[in-house]
Amino acid sequence: MAKATPEDNNALQRLRAGHAQERVGGPAGGRQLASSSTRYACGLSALTTDEPDANAFAQAIAAEAAAIDAGFALLFFSQSLVDATALSQALKAHAPSLAYAGCSTAGEITPQGLEEGHILALLLPSASFSTVSIMVDNLSSSGMDRITGEVAALRRLLRGRVGHALAKGTFALCFIDGLSYAEEAVTSAIHWGLDDIPLIGGSAGDDLKFETTRLISNGKVTSDSAIIVLITTEIPFHVFKTDNFIPTDEKLVVTASDPDHRIVREFNAINAAEEYAASVGIIPQTLTPLSFASHPVVVKVGGEYYCRSIQRMHADGSLSFFCAIDDGVVLSIAQPKNMVEATRAALKDVEEKLGGIDMILGFDCVLRRLDARNRQVFRDISELYRVNNVIGFGTYGEQYRSMHLNQTFTGIAFGERQAAE
């Protein structure tokens, strides 16, 4: 890692000063401060800001990376705050030797809870995290066999660096263009190449504009791509997922669709929006993203139910989905459970399995965020994330092992370093 400049150190000091004030003032102390710096017992370090100055944030990253000897950074950012190319150029200027990967978001999870319009960096110290990554371009024209082969090669590269003994403590992260229509195939291809390495991740978002998402990796800025990161660590970890819905007996059969664009035109041989609205007791003209978040549909795969969330309604009453869809697919209307209690129970289960949570890297469907607002539990969920040290971002879809999911929280929880010794 290159030595931090005095300018970089000043940027980091400003971040830390802001975080110290935030801890003293608490959530009720008025406006959230612009920046924070948080170090966790497991060695990871998180930096956040809501200032649109990519250079200042890159300087702070460079200073913290030098301080903890970080070899890799994960970056999640709102395109409403900062341009992906500007962020990439700032990192090249101020932290040229730091490898990184990340994507644009549909909201962020910072150490202070659920936020919007932020940049978040998670730095991995070289002493306890060994990391390799690849970017797969042109997903729409990529063969899945090529992706599987590249992941297998990446796995061999990491094993060559850390040896077979340490390779058991390995997990995989993936970030995929959330508007690529390719997440199911890509997730499956990555899973095949990983062998038994657990995979989690999130689809990049663009603040619910549904125009263009961005992925960044070591100077490259792209769309229609995916990033795979393999990480080996001595820190104990646990990969998990949680959702909050129960299937009902109300069925919707896809009878007309455009699978390539994830559009359903008809359910049960009736206009899709009209039939969906009738099934959940809503007037079709009033359907919004909040409606879809509050009344999800699920599909049964291998004995388990998975959410197939609706993205938006079109003028002709057709519906776009966040997940793959096709003629003949049978969907069930789902009844939501209490999101706060379901999430709290999942986190408690993780804590028991891990022997204590130091921090969690989480990928949270943007529809959960919308549903939390609609049910007036947004602050409760935000506080639950804050007290459990969750950081991450709001997604357009979640990856968990071989599956691409919706309206789900997927995460990896880390224990403290001492528990691994």
Image (tube, rainbow, N blue to C red):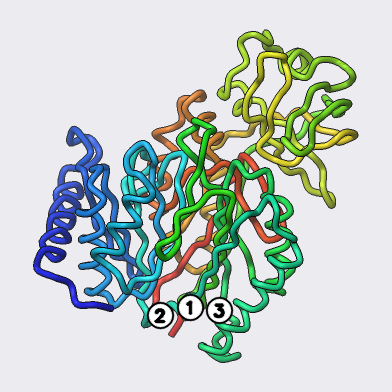
Determine the residue positioned at 55% across, 82% down. 158
Dot 3, how many residues are within 10 Å of its Cα: few (below 14), some (14-19), or many (20+)? some
Residue 82 is situated, as x and y percent measured from the top left of the image, at 32, 43
Which of the labelled discs sits on residue 169, or is there none?
3
Instruction: Determine whether the residue tagged by mark 1 lies in a helix, strand or loop.
Output: strand
Separation of disc 2 and disc 1 at Cα? 6 Å
Q: Amino acid at mark 3?
A: Gly
Q: Which residue is mark 2?
A: 128
Q: Mark 3 touching mark 1, by CB under 8 A?
A: yes
In the displayed structure image, the side of residue 388 where residue 177 appears, left or right? right
Q: Amino acid at mark 2?
A: Ser
In the displayed structure image, the side of residue 372 where residue 152 appears, left or right? right
Sequence-earlier tag: 3 or 1: 3
- Residues 41 and 200: in front is 200
Q: Amino acid at mark 1?
A: Thr
Which of the labelled discs sits on residue 233, or is there none?
1
Separation of disc 3 and disc 2 at Cα? 11 Å
Q: Quadrant of the C terminus?
A: bottom left
Instruction: Determine whether the residue tagged by mark 2 lies in a helix, strand or loop.
Output: loop
Separation of disc 3 and disc 1 at Cα? 6 Å
- Residues 305 and 421: in front is 305
Q: Mark 2 touching mark 1, by CB under 8 A?
A: yes
> Is residue 92 something one can see in this rendering?
yes
Q: Quadrant of residue 251?
A: top right
- Residues 137 and 165: in front is 137
Residue 64 is situated, as x and y percent measured from the top left of the image, at 24, 67
Sequence-earlier tag: 2 or 1: 2
